[in-house]
Amino acid sequence: MQLGRRDFLQLLGVAGASGFFAPGAIQAAWGSDKDPYDIPAYGNVTLLHMTDSHAQLLPVWWREPDTNIGVGPVLNQTPHLCGKWMLDYYGLAHSGRDEYTYSCLDYDTLAKHYGKIGGYAHIATLVKRYREQLGNRALLLDGGDTWQGSATALWTKGEDMVGAQNLLGVDDFVGHWEFTYGQKQVEYLVKNKLKAKFLAQNVFSNTWQEPVFQPYQIHEISGRRIAVIGQAFPFTPIANPGYMIPDWGFGIHTEHMQKMVDECRNDKKADLVVVLSHNGADVDKKMASLVRGIDIILGGHTHDIMGPKPFQVNQTLVINTSTNGKILARFDLDVGKGKLNGWRFHYLPVFSNLIPADAAMSEYIDGVRKPYLEKLQQPLATTGSLLYRRDNFNGTFDQLLCDALRAEMNCEASFSPGFRWGYCKLPGETITMEDVMGQTAITYPQVTVNNYTGEQIKNIMEQVADNIFNPNPYYQQGGDMIRVGNIQYDFNPDEKIYHRISNLRIGGKLASASKKYKVAGWAAMQPVEGKPVWEVFGSWLQSQKHVEVKKVELPVLNADMRSNHGIAFPKTYKL
Amino acid sequence: MKQMQRRQFLGTGVTAAAVAAVAGTGLLRAGNAFAGNVAGWPAKAFDAKVLDEAMGDSIGKTDVPVSSKVSLKAPTIAENGGAVPVTIEVDSPMTTDDYISTVWLFVDHNPTPLASQFTFTPACGKAYIQERIKMAKTDNVRVVAKTNKGELMASAPREVKVTIGGCGG
């Protein structure tokens, strides 16, 4: 049963009378039976933060990961918490609403009750409501990865999303996947189309090491000066093809960040310094420990639930605001002369069934989709399984993709990148071309076949693993472990590079270091020829008509991972 | 400020810097015809195959105390192992009585660990260098600076990871 907005509001009025929620459940879920989005004003400045929508204009299904392992200094620390560990860490009630917002628990069941999350028309309604409440005291800050992740974004080279951002009234914006449209397109959209300020203190020209973008923006609000410093994803030319942005160099640039903070405070007389960041949660925490004078880091990239309370590092409050439009974060701040006197934080799940769609935004989205509608809606197959991507290791959607690559390219093994975007499909749903694009819409989609030795396969996997599990966050790129098809392995996240993987098998047989294996993959870092992955995946799905994921190729983890709070279901790893 | 540093760098440090940068990117093997033509080219140090030898041949020591005066900036993860940008700055008054005379840059396990050597005079105004170096694999980068009085000081080593990319975000 799908819970409509009207049903829900009725339920709010008759909590306990419904057989759907247990008596008192509404009370427990929302804290009261009042409108959950009603927030009393506080202070003199409000920051609204969204991030990593990955171009999902419409509401989508989004399941939190069941595996998000933290190692070293971030062991069992937010956001490396899954399932009940996340709820317990934040002291949340194990209510349906909290389980659905903060965990992967009972996903199929709760999804049917609570409905899809996000959607720009629903976000727009919330933003408008708060702007009406707060007047010009509110800033809307977008943490990036907004222009990529959907068919229409790819086909319009990000422009459909710029239109949505303009309509939403985004004030400041930072980037990552935006850069994969190439230097020229980014410059064109930023200069000619985007109303928001595109900020980056850590992008420098490769020739002279000079800043490419405006590093920060000062906003005057309630007589206070609010500095927003932009931090682009530091490893864009490594995690994504560098040839797209040949003249731009990235990096974390901690020292330059300190310089910008000092400049904002001393020269620009900022009363509050905010960093709008696409570092990822662990990098943000480390940066907060090294840079003095940042009040708030609004983080993205790693798609983490890192609320409902901010994480504090020295004097800096750090959050991460999920993905796909699932969360709108609201910081109500009492900004004094040169200092933050007080704050209230609200981590608001955007339940699309609860929030009416904004008419202007809906009309805009319909207009964007209209020319492509037939292609988007083309049915390919039905699924009997819940399809999701986000997890440290193979998700069910990627398992299908890896199976498709092997079958279509006639290979004994396959690789697929550990992207963290890509929404879910529920059992019983039809997979359309739009859904396939939702897993694959990138500007370097070519499928290739490589003959790798066993040693090369291990080497690739070890290097990717170190980009995720290096205990020093400054050496992590984000993303999840590379997805594998017909490759099995034992894995110890706590080990060092080249020692995490053992007992590597291909087709169940121990891999030979020197033997060559035919491996299909996509998303190469160099320009290559090949069919776009959506064609390969799409045609395989069509040939299957109905898909079920019987087995997910998860690694065998070392026994001490049993107690890692980043694993919700140790049994799936036989721990 | 940036503009001025660049001009200073180009104006006064060009000979040493250009040679060092070329050696640093590996386009030029020390000991070949071009390098041999440069007066005072420290061929032995640039040819050394292991760090201790390279340090011994260039600065005469393998152990130099770390000083906060020597700043070395390098990316944590290289965007291109073939051209890793590093920035070196040594805190010094750069007066005739007290200045930095030489700066060496090492990559611990490069085939020839001494990547660059720079010579400064007080007229440089600042002991500041930006250059690009070639790195074969994930490794430590370190700097040693010498004052006109012969005092040696080193930067803390910085690890630069050279990795295959992909799979981010």
Image (tube, rainbow, N blue to C red):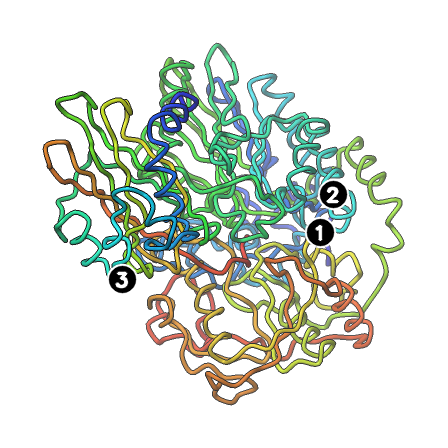
Q: Are marks 1 and 2 in contact (CB under 8 Å)?
A: no
Task: Pick out the residue farthest to the top.
Answer: A223
Quarter of the N terminus of chain B within the rendering: top left
Q: Nearer the viewer, residue A271 or B163?
A: B163
Callout 3: chain? B
Q: Residue furthest bottom?
A: A509
Name the one closer to the observer, B14 or A55. B14
Chain bearing tag 1 is A
Residue A89 located left or right of residue A434: left
**Spot occupied by residue A331 in the image (x, y as percentages of width and height):** 49, 30
Q: Which residue is mark 3?
A: B49
As drawn, the label of residue A157 is: 2
> Amino acid under label 1?
Leu
**Could you tell me which secondary element the residue under label 2 belongs to?**
loop
The image shows residue A61, relative to residue B67, as above or below, that is: below
Residue A61 drawn above or below residue A547 = above
User: Residue at image x 52%, y 56%?
Assistant: A479
Relative to B110, is A150 above or below? above
| Amino acid found under the numbered disc labelled 3 | Lys
Q: Position of residue A545 (x, y in %)?
A: 81, 75
Callout 2 crowding tier (Cα within 10 Å): few <14, some 14–19, many ≥20 = many
Question: In the figure, residue B128 lies in which quadrant?
Answer: top left
Q: Secondary structure at mark 3?
A: loop
Residue A3, numbered circle = 1
Residue A272 location, quadrant: top left
Q: Pick whichever, B75 or B168, lies toward us.
A: B75
Asked if residue A88 can be seen in this view, the reply is yes
Q: Residue at x 55, y 83 (%)?
A: A516
